[in-house]
Image (spheres, rainbow, N blue to C red):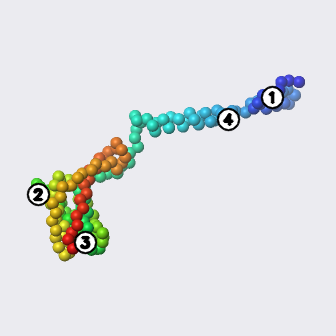
Amino acid sequence: MGRAALPGETRHRSVGGEMSWSRKPSRRFGSAAVALLVMPLALAACNPLAPKACTLIACAGTFIVEVSGASAGTPVTVVATAPDGTSKTAECRGAGAACTAFIDGFMPQTATVRVSWNSGTAEFAVTPTYVTTYPNGPDCPPACVQARVSLTIPS
């Protein structure tokens, strides 16, 4: 009569009448193979020695001057002068609430900022506070140094 089929086995009869047995591949092997492939990836994400993924955003040291009080659409000129006499100029347009002038490559410890608009000029002495950020991710170059000062022009 022969032996009974084991779990997962299939009985086959050949053309000559002989019986044979075959076993289906185990699904556990497929799950194990997937686990073996995924585990190194998961461990690499937690590994502090693994290479970090950094983006490629560039930046420059920037002195940012936010000017409040200019009417919407009013052109505003900002001239920032360092104690050594170096000065840089930027422009923005009043947006009702504030306009923002970006002065790249200018990072004085103190500065005199002259703001001019269609109906006047005002001068401010400022001591900016610089903050370092990493736009490409933590521990990814470059380090970007920026300072923001907020000024309100007289009405």
Q: Residue at x 30, y 72 (%)?
A: 96
Q: Nearer the viewer, mark 4 or mark 3?
A: 3
Q: Amino acid at mark 2?
A: Gly
Q: Which of the labelled discs sits on residue 20, or is there none?
A: none
Distance between mark 1 and mark 3 Cα atoms: 89 Å
- Could one spot residue 91 in this view of the protein? no
- Could one spot residue 20 in this view of the protein? yes
* Earlier sequence position, callout 1 versus callout 3: 1
Distance between mark 4 and mark 2 Cα atoms: 76 Å
Distance between mark 3 and mark 2 Cα atoms: 27 Å
- Which residue is label 2 attached to? 85
- Which residue is label 1 attached to? 5
Q: Secondary structure at mark 4?
A: helix
- Which residue is label 3 attached to? 70
Q: Secondary structure at mark 1?
A: loop
Q: Residue at x 27, y 70 (%)?
A: 94
Q: Determine which quarter of the picture holds residue 14.
A: top right
Distance between mark 4 and mark 3 Cα atoms: 71 Å
The N terminus - image quarter: top right
Q: Which of the labelled discs sits on residue 27, or is there none?
A: 4
Distance between mark 1 and mark 2 Cα atoms: 95 Å
